[in-house]
Image (cartoon, coloured by chain):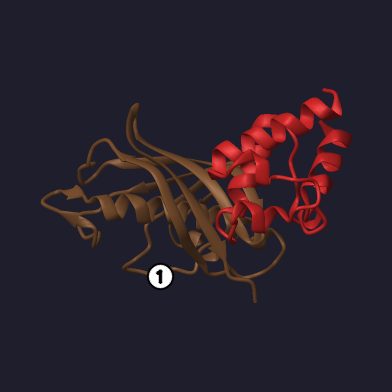
Chain colours: A brown, B red
Amino acid sequence: MFQNEQIYQLIPQRPPIVMVDTLWSATESGAETGLTIDESNIFVQNGVMREAGLIEHIAQSAAAYAGYSTFSQGLPPKLGFIGEIKSCKIHTLPAVGSQLRTEIKLMAEAAGVTLIAAETHVADTLVAECQMKIFIKED
Amino acid sequence: MEKQELIKKVNSVLAEEFEVEESIITPDANIKQTLELDSLSLVDMVALIENEFGVKIPSADLVKVQTFAALYDYLAERA
């Protein structure tokens, strides 16, 4: 498990744009990440996290998953770019203090592009879901 | 699955997903050109193949699968 500042070993983002604070687990087929929403989070407005924040959280969750792989090889995290977002549904905007828990499933990889499916929950409530294509920039 | 049956299913699935006429899918045709795949949509084809046929195509193998004939052979050996 990677938590708080340990996550910097997995993702290239730095405060104030760090949108994942925990990597709970990672396997060949996916990962589980988390984020506790702080009121100082730049995507918080009127006490809730906005849609863009949820999407960025999912993207950084995918980045943390990719970063775990490179970290295991003793390499620094690589830059990743969102190539496409589809089937995106934001069901609710979570309040400050909520703990997001996101499951990332690796669906396919081809030519440097990774297709993932993500679901974000707060406790048992589904908050957001989407598929995302991430392009990882090779050195 | 018999190879002819496999070919028919591959053509049908790809034509529907990428919205092309099945008639333009021929064994010697280039997959990327025929289905108008770019670097982002190529991964959709890989995911579709895995879902429909249970065959994962690693990136290292994907570079060898340029034509539909190569794809049929690849799947016939593994499906």
In this picture, is A131 found above or below B7?
A: below
In this picture, is A51 found above or below A42?
A: above
- The front one of A25 and B51 is B51
Direction top: furthest residue: B1
Q: Is residue B76 left or right of residue A51?
A: right
Does residue A57 appear in the picture of this structure? yes
Direction front: furthest residue: B23
Q: Which residue is mark 1?
A: A14
- The front one of B50 and A56 is B50
Which residue: 83% across, 48% down?
B70
How far across and down, in percent of the image, does residue A122 sit? 32, 35
How far across and down, in percent of the image, does residue A19 sit? 37, 57
How far across and down, in percent of the image, does residue B43 sit? 61, 51
- The front one of B2 and A106 is B2
Badge 1: residue crowd in 10 Å (few <14, some 14–19, many ≥20): few
Which residue: 81% across, 30% down?
B79
**Res A105 quadrant in image:** top right
Direction left: furthest residue: A46
Q: Is residue B5 left or right of residue A124?
A: right
**Res A99 quadrant in image:** top left
Tag 1 secondary structure: loop
In this picture, is A68 found above or below B71?
A: below
Which residue: 84% across, 42% down?
B74
Direction bottom: furthest residue: A139
**Res A88 quadrant in image:** top left
Q: Is residue A80 left or right of residue A98?
A: right
How far across and down, in percent of the image, does residue B41 sit? 56, 53
